[in-house]
Image (cartoon, grey):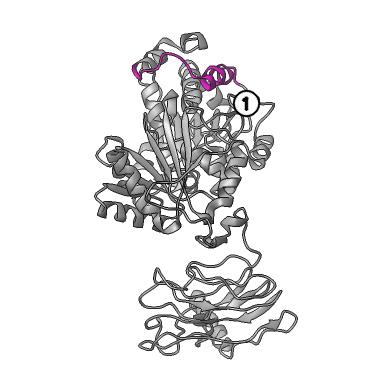
């Protein structure tokens, strides 16, 4: 089968041939005719199988052979004299947006179609200037697109084709509400295309709401990994992972390695350590500027950079031909992310290798992944780095969530601990620290105890001088409203992170608003402050701070100011 036989024009086929492609992949062979037919489509395929060309090629074909004039005349409220956006492609990340729009430009270089990429992290004015000119195909992330909608710099009233690419990741990232807002701005009569590498219940629910009698295309078993990827697990102690990774890179003479971690801070630290080991490495994640992310990705693609350390979100859109190695330095707590991670290698029919460094804390994550992909991964150890299976597993903290790797990544019943904080489980008991010794990363130690549905006053300790002057609190103090909530013990330390302790569904009361110091408050220049108290049944009303009238006075003063 050739691209010509799929109904594509000679100009588009010419551009595809110049990219080095002569035979369509299975997903392209099925998706291109379905999109050209004009109906809705739900497509699932493994990462790296050519999904992007599966929708960009037929969209280019349709838009280049039809004109929007008739639709513009029939659409009420259309802006006269301004070319409409005819196709909208929504993607979850900046890198993926840039990759998709680059494919549109490359495949459409011989047809008169104009495209634009739109994402956050960069200046908005150049995008506004570009929107004043013709844009047929707009590739955007939901957040920045809604920013332009709010400024009325983009008109979506004449969109003919909507594409949701990497739909599963957009839902994982919490974009469902933004997607609904965008859908409300589009004309009801349009073609909808939904592409996803994994199928979850949320994807099925979204498809039911969005698609009208769609064609269903699956070129592989759901949530499957590519057959050309060699997968293996290296069992290692948690404190030896960096040494094992450096050993694998050096002994195997790996020239291009994509390493995945769970947290941004972990990416930065590992990249620094690898550079100290003589291995060129850079980190890429959401806190990096767009310029830094683009530079790191460019150096990684051209071979200047040996190791790129990335989070799951930032890695979406990293499309590198013949990337040989992917390493899971930390296993993802969401099993579907494993499929996306290793899908960065073994793309377009090339061979690839995926190595997962697994410690005793992550064995349940590994079991969940194997259950998802329906295969058991081979396990091995590295000579010289003995693995001790008798080590006691430790909880894994993910941002504001604490999960237990030995319990399938479930959230503990006690709620959501803050960064650098402790959280008491529902039903009482001592809280679990961010780290076993309660130290590290500038976060202070703290201990809390709370019974079921109680308001507890927790004790906390901070390092250094608490912020705030006389009459001001050193930091936040919270009167929790239920389910094991606890009061913040210490103010923010001058030299480190937060030492607060937040309970789930607690109603925070900031001492600044109440005009006086609460539990844990300390005037400037003093050492760490501590607050303490005892658990109180939920039925007993919480004592109101004595400074409450001062808060009313502040509000009254603000109201008077606005009246002026």
The residue depicted at 39 percent of the width and 21 percent of the height is 107
Which corner quadrant of the image does residue 133 belong to? top left
Residue 423 against residue 369 in the figure, above or below: below
Query: Could you tell me which residue is drawn at 46 percent across and 80 percent down?
Result: 491
Secondary element at image label 1: loop
Instruction: Please state the horizontal and vertical placement of residue 337, each as a whole percent of the image.
Output: 53, 43
Q: Name the residue under label 1.
A: 40
Q: Can residue 292 be seen in this view?
A: yes
Would you place residue 416 above or below residue 496 in this image? above
Rendering coords of residue 445 (x, y %): 47, 76
Front residue of 343/490: it is: 343
Tell me if residue 22 is in the magenta stretch. Answer: yes
Which residues fall within the magenta stretch? Answer: 18-38
Residue 114, percent across and down?
39, 27
Is residue 448 on the magenta stretch? no
Q: Position of residue 483 (x, y in %)?
A: 68, 71
Q: Is residue 441 left or right of residue 187?
A: left
Q: Which residue appears at 57% of the width and 56% of the height?
A: 405
């Amino acid at each position: 089968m050739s691209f010509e036989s799929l109904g594509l024009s000679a100009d588009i086929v010419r551009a595809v041939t110049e990219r080095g492609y002569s035979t369509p992949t299975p997903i392209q062979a099925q998706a291109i005719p379905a999109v050209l037919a004009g109906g809705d489509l739900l497509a699932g395929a493994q990462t790296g199988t050519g999904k992007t060309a599966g929708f960009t090629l037929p969209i280019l074909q349709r838009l280049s052979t039809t004109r929007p004039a008739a639709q513009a005349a029939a659409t009420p409220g259309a802006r006269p004299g301004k070319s409409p956006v005819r196709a909208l492609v929504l993607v979850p990340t900046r890198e993926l947006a840039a990759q998709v729009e680059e494919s549109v430009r490359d495949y459409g270089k011989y047809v008169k179609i104009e495209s634009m990429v739109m994402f956050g992290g960069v200046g908005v004015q150049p995008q506004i200037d570009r929107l004043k000119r013709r844009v047929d195909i707009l590739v955007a992330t939901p957040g920045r697109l809604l920013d332009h909608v709010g400024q009325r710099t983009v008109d979506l009233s004449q969109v003919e084709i909507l594409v949701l690419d990497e739909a599963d990741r957009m839902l994982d990232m919490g974009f469902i509400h933004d997607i609904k807002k965008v859908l409300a701005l589009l004309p009801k009569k349009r073609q909808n295309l939904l592409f996803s590498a994994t199928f979850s219940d949320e994807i099925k629910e979204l498809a039911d709401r969005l698609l009208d009698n769609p064609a269903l295309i699956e070129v592989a078993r759901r949530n499957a990994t590519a057959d050309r990827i060699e997968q293996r697990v290296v069992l290692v102690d948690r404190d030896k992972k960096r040494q094992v990774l450096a050993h694998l890179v050096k002994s195997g003479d790996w020239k291009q390695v994509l390493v995945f971690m769970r947290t941004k801070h972990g990416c930065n630290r590992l990249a620094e350590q690898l550079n100290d080991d003589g291995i060129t490495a850079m980190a890429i994640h959401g806190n990096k500027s767009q310029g830094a992310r683009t530079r790191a990705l460019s150096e990684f693609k051209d071979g200047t950079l040996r190791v790129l350390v990335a989070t799951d979100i930032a890695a979406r859109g990293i499309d590198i031909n013949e990337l040989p190695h992917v390493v899971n330095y930390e296993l993802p707590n969401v099993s579907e992310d494993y499929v996306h991670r290793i899908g960065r290698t073994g793309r377009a029919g090339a061979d690839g290798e995926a190595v997962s460094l697994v410690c005793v804390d992550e064995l349940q994550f590994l079991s969940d992944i194997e259950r998802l992909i329906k295969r058991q991964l081979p396990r091995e150890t590295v000579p010289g780095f003995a693995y001790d299976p008798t080590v006691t597993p430790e909880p894994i903290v993910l941002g504001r969530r604490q999960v237990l790797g030995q319990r399938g990544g479930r959230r503990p019943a006690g709620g959501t601990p803050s960064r650098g904080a402790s959280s008491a489980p529902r039903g009482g008991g001592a809280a679990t620290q961010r780290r076993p010794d309660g130290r590290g990363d500038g976060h202070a130690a703290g201990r809390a105890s709370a019974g079921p549905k109680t308001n507890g006053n927790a004790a906390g300790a901070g390092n250094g001088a608490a912020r705030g002057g006389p009459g001001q609190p050193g930091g936040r103090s919270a009167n929790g409203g239920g389910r094991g909530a606890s009061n913040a013990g210490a103010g923010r330390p001058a030299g480190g992170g937060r030492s607060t302790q937040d309970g789930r569904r607690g109603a925070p009361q900031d001492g600044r608003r109440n005009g006086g110091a609460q539990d844990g408050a300390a005037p400037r220049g003093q050492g760490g402050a501590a607050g303490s108290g005892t658990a109180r049944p939920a039925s007993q009303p919480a004592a109101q701070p004595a400074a409450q009238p001062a808060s009313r006075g502040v509000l009254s003063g603000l109201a008077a100011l606005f009246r002026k």
